[in-house]
Amino acid sequence: MSEDDARAEPRHPIGSVDNAIRLLLLLRDHTTLRVSEVSEKLGVVPSTAHRLLAMFEHHGLVQKDTRTKEYSPGPALLTLGLSVVRHDVRARLNPVMRSLVREANETCSLLVVEGTNSLFIDAVECDRPVRTTSRVGLVRPAHVTSGGKALLAELSDAEIIRRYPDEELPGVTDHSIRSRSALLEQLALVRQRGYAIGDRENEPDIWAIARVVRTPDGVPFCALSLSCPADRHTEQAEADMAALLERAAKQAESSSF
């Protein structure tokens, strides 16, 4: 069967399914969507567009900003999309992660960011009795994870403001960043030193450090992080892990994606 034949319209198309698939493709190409935009682009009445978005929201495929009334990709869509590339990325970077864990003797995680969410897509645990355990599959606000902040720092301040239209940010622990102003300050520091820190911001007893991994053409793609119990963190440990992460990121970048 040729590619054209495979792409030919089915003999008995189902309109509702077609609209749902077309909405998925819109979410692929647009960071945010309004009901009016979905209505126009799909060629359906606004009430139909609203019902489609409501069903997507129910299943976690989109999330609605109650202030702007805009819809953006949700955690379930992030997980679904990443499942397509997860195995390939994990296969390519897992050896780098294992080498990093052997050198650092701390747990390594691989994270990506979509919108304002970070997702843990792989992990290699160290064998220390007290250690950070795997968070694979966990979705967290990007601004509370070291990997999330490392990737957010690759964006301009204007893009950060667009993604975070409100000054107040949701927190996860007592140490989480809770304002956009504080986030912008931290991201400036990340850009300056080349790595991001998560000091008990995602979990109350975990400290983490992360660095971005880029594709061969220089595009930020994912982040490698090392994490440990907060009471194991010292300035020297931070410097050592930062150096190990820099070397690991360069090794990862030498692999073709």
Image (cartoon, grey):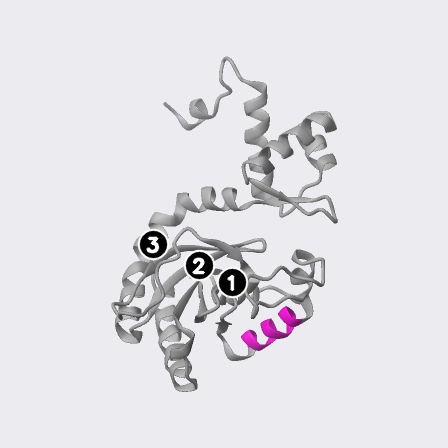
Vertical relation: 160 (above or below) 44: below
Q: Is residue 188 left or right of residue 102?
A: right
Identify which amino acid the numbered label 1 is placed on: Gly
The residue mark sitting in front, 2 or 3, is: 2
Membership of 248 in magenta stretch? no
Q: Which residue is mark 3?
A: 90
Q: Residue at x 32, y 71 (%)?
A: 106
Vertical relation: 32 (above or below) 232: above
Q: Which residue is mark 2?
A: 111
The residue mark sitting in front, 1 or 3, is: 1
Identify which amino acid the numbered label 2 is placed on: Leu
Q: Give the CA distance from mark 1 to mark 3.
A: 18 Å
Q: Give the CA distance from mark 2 to mark 3.
A: 11 Å
Foreground residue, 68 or 15? 68
Question: Circle 1 — which element?
Answer: helix
Which region shows up in magenta? 182-191
Vertical relation: 146 (above or below) 18: below
Residue 212 place in picture, x, y as percent: 46, 66
Q: Earlier in the sequence, mark 1 or mark 3?
A: 3
Question: Circle 2 — which element?
Answer: strand
Q: Earlier in the sequence, mark 2 or mark 3?
A: 3
Q: Residue at x 54, y 65 (%)?
A: 173
Q: Which residue is mark 1?
A: 148
Pointer 3: residues within 10 angstroms few (<14), some, or many (20+)? Answer: some
Q: Residue at x 72, y 27 (%)?
A: 47
Prevalent SS, magenta region: helix
Pointer 2: residues within 10 angstroms few (<14), some, or many (20+)? Answer: many
Residue 204 place in picture, x, y as percent: 48, 68
Q: Where the C terminus falls, by quadrant?
A: bottom left
Mark 2 in CB contact with mark 1 (< 8 angstroms)? yes
